[in-house]
Amino acid sequence: MLLKLILWFVHFKLATSAIDFRFNGFKGVNLSLDGSAVLTYNGLLMLTDLNKQLKGHGFYPTSLGLGNLFSFSTTFVFAIVPEYPGMGCCGFAFTLSPSKDFSHAFPTKYMGLFNSTSDENPSNHVLAIEFDTAMNPEVRDLNANHVGIDINGLVSIRSITAGFTSDDNGEQMNLNLISGNPMQVWIDYDGMDMQLNVTLAPLWQPRPSLSLLSSTINLSSVFLDDMYVGFSASTGGVGSQHIILGWSLKVDGRAHDLNLASLPSLQQSLTSSKKKPLALLSGLPLAVAVLVLIVAFSVMFIVMRKRKFSEESLEDWELDFEPHRFSYRQLFKATKGFKDENLLGIGGFGKVYRGVLPSSRIEVAVKRVSHDSRQGMREFVAEIVSLGKLRHRNLVQLLGYCRRKGELLIVYEYMPNGSLDKLLFYEGEPTLNWDQRFQVIKGVANGLQYLHEDWEQIVIHRDVKASNVLLDSDMNGRLGDFGLARLYSHGGAPQTTNVVGTPGYFAPELIRTHKSTTNSDVYAFGAFLLEVACGRRPLEPKKEANQQVLLDWVLSNWNRGTILETRDPKLGEDYVVDELELVLKLGLICSHTLPTARPSMRQVTQILHGDLPLPDLPIPHFSSSDSSAFIETECFSAYALSFPSMSSESSLFSGR
Ligand SMILES: *[C@@H]1O[C@H](CO)[C@@H](O)[C@H](O)[C@H]1NC(C)=O
Ligand SMILES: *[C@@H]1O[C@H](CO)[C@@H](O)[C@H](O)[C@H]1NC(C)=O
Ligand SMILES: *[C@@H]1O[C@H](CO)[C@@H](O)[C@H](O)[C@H]1NC(C)=O
Ligand SMILES: *[C@@H]1O[C@H](CO)[C@@H](O)[C@H](O)[C@H]1NC(C)=O
């Protein structure tokens, strides 16, 4: 008995270790295709084209061969491009089946999987996750845009309108399957808990934490020893292109992430069919002359292009990061050659360009950071890649990088509403109302808490300030450039000092210790709170002497009981007194001279959400920037300071 169990286990392990693949596009991939399915020249799996009454299948050629108790995980990217906008038929299904032979199956509502007699037959042993774009009352379809779990037939055991639950606000967002836009799907089945989860999201969006469908199903009677896996699609009275762009699957483990940046382009394959044939040339001598010229120009063109797009070749250590690597050519194309009209801004670390990735038509921001030394590059890239794993609704998502001679290009998600400082400080710009500001503050606090406390490593931002806060399409605040300040100091930076950051946001102890901590981030966050509430920068040398240092000015107003008078005049009377007062006082507390007197970011978010009262400090005596005052504090007592003299910072950071 024991021996049998061991043998079974060995067999099981041997068999399962085999299937683990990742196709970032299907160029050169061996798939079993039938019906209308083709691989396009650039590596798309096109299951059907726009013709009517088609069925097409693309399957992994070998069986999963597993016995009937197992787990699998898969992710793929698909797009459905209908014949007419909003009008297409019929959908496709991710399928596990004991056979790759679907010759008896019908198109249209049968999705190329069953026929009128085989539908609902328990001997089918088919699991299908359908992405159905036609409403069929006979099989009790919910609507013409749903995702369903089908076992042995077309009547779904569970189905739901296509969409996802936003991690931002918990709202259910619908997605239109036949929009033509690429979307990503994750399907996981755990044979032990018998949990089947299906999750859907627009391409480039991180996997939503809530699944669209989550079902407990005992599939052990459905799965046979040999099961094949793949996709089936069909068209009906109207056609649709059903396209799979990339696919990753693993048995008994988590599927590898797809490298979204290297998926084949949807656009090219769709327009290629429209290319007109070249008109025939008449006259042989002319043809030869033209040919010679064409060859000469092509060679020149290729040589120049090669030079233009030259990037550092892939080194061994980089192989692990390959999924996050963009080619220079891709980024060059995306930003139309880094044209000035695509310039979004010039940040602390370099120029930032707006771009649209050629393959997926996704908008990105590309930051060019000059990086002279080869030394430290590996570390730099490793950190960038690890920062790319940070996923939070209040952080700007880092998508990948490209390494080129003397510079590094970092690719971020594009934020349509720009940076917060523009809306706060620039004359003539529409400003934010109080509700929007409070929303942004809470968002940034959440993002910073995630960096400090909720991720697997502690990430210190080092440069929290309004100009590093970007606004997404819903005006949520998102922190950008996290961790970069330190990365930048690894090498190649113009000033290679450990002290990076921005004057005015700079915790006083940093001047002495040169060591950033979560506490120094909290200090900068305090300065940021005051910026948002007061609508001005932390240091404004042109102001009257008592107002130049924002922190000191707000503090002296707190002492006098007039703290609300420091608010941004542009707010008018449109603000919530309690919230404004909370933000101003919290700003002062966060910017306490003594690092240990500052709250943690977790406490800050709790205070902002009203779950924790403001610390009951005596009106604190501290200075924004006076380092001698700081040393005094540290050596003697927290509250025994004399009121700060004007800052010594201007001399420390002269020439700012
Ligand atoms: C594709 O895979 C199948 C199954 O492993 C194999 O029989 C076939 O020869 C392969 N075809 C190519 C072109 O490699
Ligand atoms: C349906 O498919 C089965 C095989 O799965 C086949 O034996 C049967 O003849 C088909 N029925 C029709 C009506 O085509
Ligand atoms: C499916 O989702 C549930 C609830 O989110 C989770 O507890 C479970 O681990 C998931 N199962 C798999 C196989 O991903
Ligand atoms: C799942 O189904 C199989 C076969 O029908 C059965 O033997 C097994 O006990 C079921 N498992 C559970 C946990 O119900």
Image: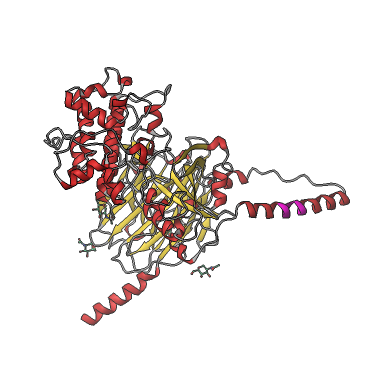
Is residue 140 covered in magenta?
Answer: no
Query: Where, by quadrant of the figure, is residue 504 drawn?
Result: top left
In the rendered structure, the answer to whether residue 154 lies left or right of residue 79 reads left
Judging depth in this view, the residue of 562 and 445 nearest the camera is: 562
Please provide percent x and percent y for residue 542. 38, 26
600 shown above or below 124: above
- Figure quadrant of the N terminus: bottom left
The residue lying at 33 percent from left, 38 percent from top is: 649
Residue 102 at least partly seen: no
Q: Quadrant of residue 348?
A: top left
* Residue 266 position within the rendered picture, expressed as x and y whole percent measured from the top left: 53, 46
The answer to whether residue 297 is magenta is yes
- Give how far across and how far down residue 394 sits, in percent: 32, 41
Colour style of the rendered protein structure: secondary structure
Q: Residue at x 56, y 37 (%)?
A: 340
Q: Which residues are magenta?
A: 295-300
